[in-house]
Image: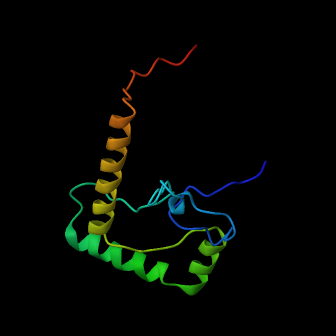
C-alpha cells in the first residue's frame, strides 16, 4: 500500500513529504482531520468549567506531553469551550453542505441479527 496524500489542510509533521489534499488544486481548504474535545454535562457550573479549562490548558502546555503527542501527529491546542463550540458548529455546517450536495438521506438503523 502506498500513501498518496493526507486528508488534511496542511502536510503532517509525521510525513512532511506527503502532500495534503487541502493544498491540491480544486481541494483548497479540504480538511478531514481528527480532533478531540473535553466535554462536561450540560448545566455544569461555570466555575467548574473554568477550573477544568485552566487545568486542561496547563496540562497541554507541558513540553513533555506535547512532545509525546507530537510523536503521534497530534497538535494540542487547548482552546476554550467557546472555541470548541464554534469549531463544532462549523464542522456541522460543513458536513450538512456535503450531505445536501450528495443528496444523502438517513436510513433507520436495523435491529442486530440474532
Q: Quadrant of the C terminus?
A: top right
Q: Residue at x 63, y 63 (%)?
A: 19
Q: Is residue 61 left or right of residue 39?
A: right
Q: Residue at x 27, y 71 (%)?
A: 48
Query: Measured along the vertical axis of the image, is residue 62 above or below residue 2?
Result: below
Find residue 93 and report its horizontal and vertical position in percent: 30, 49
Residue at the limit of the structure toward the right, as seen here: 1
Residue at the limit of the structure toward the front, as seen here: 25
Find residue 26 and report its horizontal and vertical position in percent: 47, 54
The residue closer to the viewer here, 3 or 76, is 3
Q: Is residue 68 left or right of residue 88?
A: right
The residue closer to the viewer here, 105 or 103, is 103
Find residue 53 and report its horizontal and vertical position in percent: 34, 74
Query: Measured along the vertical axis of the image, is residue 112 above or below residue 33?
Result: above
Query: Measured along the vertical axis of the image, is residue 79 above or below residue 110?
Result: below
Q: Residue at x 36, y 59 (%)?
A: 39
Q: Is residue 70 left or right of residue 33?
A: right
The residue closer to the viewer here, 66 or 50, is 66
Where, by quadrant of the figure, is residue 37 drawn?
bottom left
Residue at the limit of the structure toward the bottom, as seen here: 63
Task: Give the tally of numbered discs.
Answer: 0
Q: How is the image coloured?
A: rainbow
Residue at the limit of the structure toward the top, as seen here: 114
Q: Residue at x 33, y 64 (%)?
A: 84
Find residue 89 and report its horizontal and vertical position in percent: 28, 54
Amino acid at each position: 500500500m502506498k500513501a498518496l496524500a493526507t486528508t488534511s489542510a496542511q502536510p503532517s509533521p509525521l510525513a512532511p513529504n506527503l502532500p495534503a489534499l487541502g493544498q491540491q488544486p480544486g481541494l483548497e481548504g479540504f480538511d478531514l482531520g481528527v480532533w478531540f474535545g473535553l466535554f462536561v454535562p450540560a448545566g455544569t457550573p461555570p466555575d467548574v468549567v473554568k477550573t477544568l479549562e485552566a487545568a486542561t490548558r496547563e496540562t497541554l502546555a507541558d513540553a513533555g506531553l506535547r512532545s509525546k503527542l507530537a510523536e503521534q501527529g497530534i497538535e494540542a491546542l487547548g482552546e476554550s469551550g467557546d472555541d470548541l463550540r464554534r469549531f463544532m458548529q462549523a464542522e456541522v455546517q460543513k458536513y450538512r453542505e456535503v450531505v445536501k450536495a450528495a443528496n444523502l438521506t438517513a436510513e433507520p438503523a436495523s435491529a442486530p441479527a440474532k
